[in-house]
Image: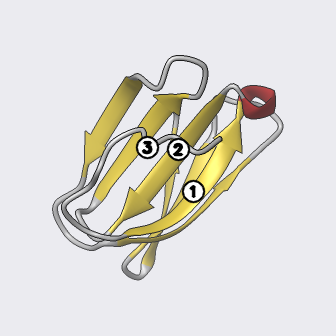
Amino acid sequence: TARTLQKNESAINDIALLAEGRYAVSGGEDKALRVWDLETGALVREWIGEASVVAGLASSDDPQHVLAAVGRNLLEWNP
């Protein structure tokens, strides 16, 4: 079964799973990082950047850290 959490107005470039698959973080052309609760489909947290699009994401086993490739920078985000 497929479900749309939210339709973005711009492309999503990458996603990563957090907390053993309970949450997902997305990033893309709109310069935003968003955390989604995969059980409810709700947007949990959002960070909107100003400079560059989010090109890639990586998460650690610790759900408190996400790394994002933003322009020429590596951003550490604690959702």
Q: Horizontal and vertical percent for residue 30?
A: 23, 63
Q: Nearer the viewer, residue 49 or 32?
A: 32
Q: Amino acid at mark 1?
A: Ile
Residue 79 visible? The answer is: no
Q: Secondary structure at mark 3?
A: loop
Q: Which label was assigned to residue 15?
A: 1
Badge 2: how crowded within 10 Å, few (<14), some, or many (20+)? many
Which label's residue is closer to the chain start, 2 or 1? 1
Q: Which residue is mark 2?
A: 25
Verify CB contact (< 8 Å) between mark 3 and mark 2.
no
Q: Secondary structure at mark 1?
A: strand
Q: Amino acid at mark 2?
A: Val
Q: Which label was assigned to residue 4?
A: 3
**Residue extending farthest front:** 1
Q: Horizontal and vertical percent for residue 54?
A: 39, 68
Verify CB contact (< 8 Å) between mark 3 and mark 1.
no
Q: Amino acid at mark 3?
A: Thr
